[in-house]
Amino acid sequence: MDTQKLADLLYPNAKPIEYWLEKYPKRNLKRGAEVTRLAPSPTGYLHTGHAYSALINKLTAKKSDGVFYLRLEDTDQKRLIDNAGDIAYNMLVSYDLTPDEGYRGDELPQIGEYGDYIQSKRLNIYQSFAKYLVEKGKAFPCFCKKSEGLEDVEERRQKQLEETGAIEEHDPCRTLSYEEIEEKINNGEEFALKLKSCGNPEKTIKVVDLIKGEREIRENAKDIVLMKSNGIPPYAFAHAVDDSLMGTTIVVRGEEWYPSLSAHLELFKALGFKPPKYAHTPVICKLDENGNKRKLSKRKDPEADVRYFIEEGYPKIAVIEYLLNLLNSDFEIWRTNNPKLSYKEFPFSIEKIGSNNPMFDFIKLADISKNYISHLSADEVYAMLTEWARRYDVEFFKTLTENQDYSKAVLNIDRETPKPRKDIAKWNEVKNYFDYMFYGIKNYELDGVDKKKVKEVINAYKDVYNEEDDKETWFARIKELAPKLGYATDNKAYKQNPENYKGNIADLCMYIRIALTGRKNSPDIYSIAQILGAREVNRRFENML
Ligand code: GLU
């Protein structure tokens, strides 16, 4: 068949591919510079898996003085969600994963020489490459309606497998003559363009995955769709064209794409492009109700949407460090040895990513976050907390900002010391954590505590309490008071003969703590009393009596 004639018939107006190849020349980057990209489909909000990939992309590009860009894959028009692209970009920015190039939300102009970075605006480019494949005899039009349902396909494949031991997906429209095609076109019939696969599924090819190493995959034999009848390409074709023209050197994508890799490789070959390197990432999982491992699901798991962490008040850096810890298991040791450095200094490497699907672990996230928050100054905590509260807890925001100095003093309790307290994991916990400092005591935690003893201690202690005392004197006074009230100051003596005492000095301190905070546990009680001030301390003592 005269494929040039066919190409002109199918795509009379398409520009030759040379036009695009000239428009998008090779990038002028230093040797070894990697070009990476995040290519979300705006069919949902930014998934935690995207943040995970974005982090790999960003760190890899940065490490090699390369480029990380954002491309919007909006070719699945039926599933589009308003604003999802804009939200995706803004989420990347807020997690400090800002792309160097590409789509930047609906408000800002795109940056970069390789645009448009929105696939639906690149249809004429895909058409040129589609036409090129027809010219080369590597693609053909298919006029079949989508009448074959999924079940029919499976049944046919199963039959084929039983009869021949191999699945071939060659399409019946492959053999249409030029005249037949012309007639259909003249009749106004719509067509999809398909790849004329020349793969042999009995053969395998070796591929090197940057994460999983050498892998073997069956050759593609399927005549996959390149352009749908509406002129829009499905993922595979758009991926091959865009990543080639945009000069991507590493494609980081979820493992779920791995089974279609051989089709993608065949496509690159047909187009005459060198394929990029691939890194198929493990997929973040969790355990379901029955203890089975499953992928994080946007419908079932709030933590699948990166906005969740912001709403809950996890500091963004803590979330990033948690993801980094899932990616490179030596991050944790590095963090312990380098408590002051930014995670950006960590020697991240794609090759160090483990192959197993990691489990999302809230306890680990909380640990990382507590550790991070504990090293912040009171001013930093105040700034981040109020920024969060301004949006998510207006009442608390008012409380915090009405008396800034007082709020900072509270937030500074057990902070900015060599061993800061690691209690707060997210900003929505602070109000409850310190409610006795901001809203008074609503109820007392007294289970297992003898209220009579508390009263007796407070009654005596209120007379020796002096706001002017420094920490040492404050504690010295308690120590002095303890034996007078029958409490042991020597823990060993107390352990040997507990019956001789009403309790030990720790119990006595706990009673003071209960009177001042309503709780059996709290940060440093001396600091709490100092910040509350003598009037409030005395009022709380009176309330206890
Ligand atoms: N649009 C695809 C997705 O959101 C991109 C996969 C890729 O990165 O190539 O999963």
Image (tube, helix red, strand yellow):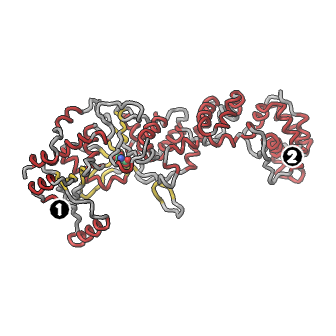
Nearer to us: label 1 or label 2: 1
Q: In terms of depth relative to the viewer, which is nearer, 75 or 479?
A: 75
Q: Is residue 392 visible?
A: yes
Query: What residue appears at the point 38 percent right and 46 percent down from the top-left corner?
Result: 41
- Please give the residue where the numbered disc 1 appears in the rendered image: 172
Say the numbered circle drawn on residue 398. Answer: none
What's the distance in space between the residues labelled 1 and 2, CA to CA? 88 Å
Query: What residue appears at the point 63 percent right and 31 percent down from the top-left corner?
Result: 382
Figure check: 440 above or below 304: above
In percent of width and height, residue 220 lies at 23, 57
Q: Are the residues at dot 1 and dot 2 in contact (C-beta closer than 8 Å)?
A: no
Q: Is residue 324 left or right of residue 222?
A: right
Q: Amino acid at mark 2?
A: Val
Query: What residue appears at the point 60 percent right and 42 percent down from the top-left corner?
Result: 426
> Where is residue 68, by image quadrant?
top left
Callout 1: CB less than 8 Å from ligand 1: no
Q: In terms of depth relative to the viewer, which is nearer, 493 or 365?
A: 365
> Where is residue 509, by image quadrant?
top right
Q: Is residue 279 visible?
A: no
Disc with the residue nearer the chain's start (1 vs 2): 1
- The quarter of the rendered structure image containing the C terminus is top right
Element on which disc 2 rests: helix
Query: What residue appears at the point 35 percent right and 48 percent down from the top-left corner?
Result: 77
Say the numbered circle drawn on residue 454. Answer: 2
Element on which disc 1 rests: helix
> Where is residue 458, by image quadrant?
top right
Q: Amino acid at mark 1?
A: Pro
Q: Is residue 422 left or right of residue 478?
A: left
In percent of width and height, residue 294 lies at 46, 58
